[in-house]
Amino acid sequence: MSFALSSFHKDAARWRRDWIAVLIWVSIPLMLGGLITILMGANVKPSGTLLLVDEDQTFFSELIVGAYSAGELGEFLNVEKTNYDDGLARVNAGEASGLLVIPEGFAAAFLESEPVTLTLRTNPSQTILPGIIRNVNEILLDAGFYAHQLFSDEIETLTSMSDDPTDAQVAAIAVAIQNKMETVAPQLFPPVINIAIVEPPEEKPGPPLALLYMPGVIMMAVVFSANGLAADFWREREQGTLRRLVFSPALMGEFLAGKALAAGLIITLVSGFTLLLGFLYHGIGWTHYPVSLLWLMVSGIALFAWFSALQMLFTNQKIAGVVSTLLVFPLLMAGGSFFPLAVMPGWIATIGRASPNGFMADRLTTEVTSIGAGAIDLQSWLIVLVGAVSGLIICGWRLRAGFARA
């Protein structure tokens, strides 16, 4: 047991000096997870400015202004009145989404059914808001055309009146407009479908998507660190440590136990820091933290053991490093580090949960999203423990079978 502790202290001191590698294992998943969390939590609406030059200054031109600033359209489109020169300069400088010019005589031309031109200039560096402005403008023009066709008699009566119409004339026009609206209402606003309101069964809201990303991102840190720690066996071989251990079979088990404990410590520090930030950000109950951290430590030792066994299959460190690195990224992709298992298609999620890191991330998700602590079942703990022990046994076999003597 004293030799196992010596092996543990040796590896811990070595990795303490190589703190840059440990920092990389933490920083890459942390940056990725931070960006994903910010993007998933952001609720950004497009916002822009429509510059409007009203050269007509009439009731009809004010209707156009009101159409752009009313309802949901007004939530992301700010309408500012300006003059033509200033508005054109601002659009050309990219400071506004569009410039709409209502020419003088617009109302008179509308009432007389004469041609009139509305000038719209849009910002070429934008696509969504200029398109919305253009579509709204076309809808308003179409609505004005059909309104003129429908109420042509009333409009003609209005234009032929004197400047001071009587109350009777105004009332007559209002009644005529009302009668026409009642006549065409069934055609303009027909009931498209019959709606039957059925109350759905009440469902509990699921965890937020950003929270579902967290276990996969943390497992990314565990996979990176386990793969990096596994390469330490090559360093031991270059220094002749493994060659001497072959002649002391009794010490081989303690040597592997010490390396597994050191790897578990490093992985606990790496994943524990990321886990701590996730708990703080998502407000997860702290009773889940010790169980989650212990799960990550045991899972990390199991991954370390199997990555070590994999690297010992090859003849040189370069090939072993390339192969293990190539294996890491498919594991991360399938295991929910880039896309949560909960949002994957069913068959892909099934494959992902069968992968080692996917299985571990899935159980960590169960723990952090459950009401009470200790949600990971006993069978899952046994699977990970058996994986760690069997991986270390294979490592010992490979060391005795020739890897240490090479």
Image (spheres, rainbow, N blue to C red):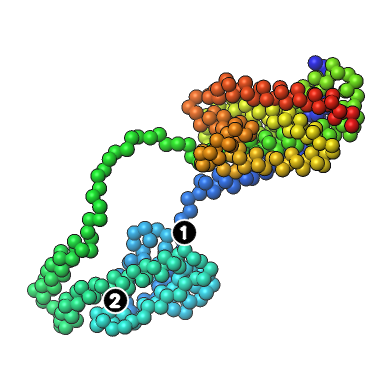
- The picture places residue 383, in percent across and down from the top left corner, at 63, 23
Mark 1 belongs to which amino acid?
A: Pro
Camera-side residue: 133 or 96? 133
Please tell me whether mark 1 sits on a helix, a strand or a loop: loop
Q: Find residue 168 and report its horizontal and vertical position in percent.
A: 8, 74
Q: Residue at x 88, y 23 (%)?
A: 245
The quadrant where residue 215 appears: top right
- The residue type indicated by label 2 comes to Thr
Residue at point 84% right, 34% down?
234
Classify the position of the N terminus by image quarter.
Answer: top right
Label 1: which residue? 46
* Image-quadrant location for residue 262: top right
Query: Is residue 277 visible from the viewing direction of this image?
Result: no
> Which residue does the numbered mark 2 point to in the structure image?
58
* Residue 71 location, quadrant: bottom left
Question: Front-most of 246 and 95?
Answer: 246
Crowding near the residue tagged with mark 1, few <14, some 14–19, many ≥20 C-alpha atoms within 10 Å = few
Residue at screen point 29% across, 70% down: 143
x%, y% of residue 72?
A: 37, 58
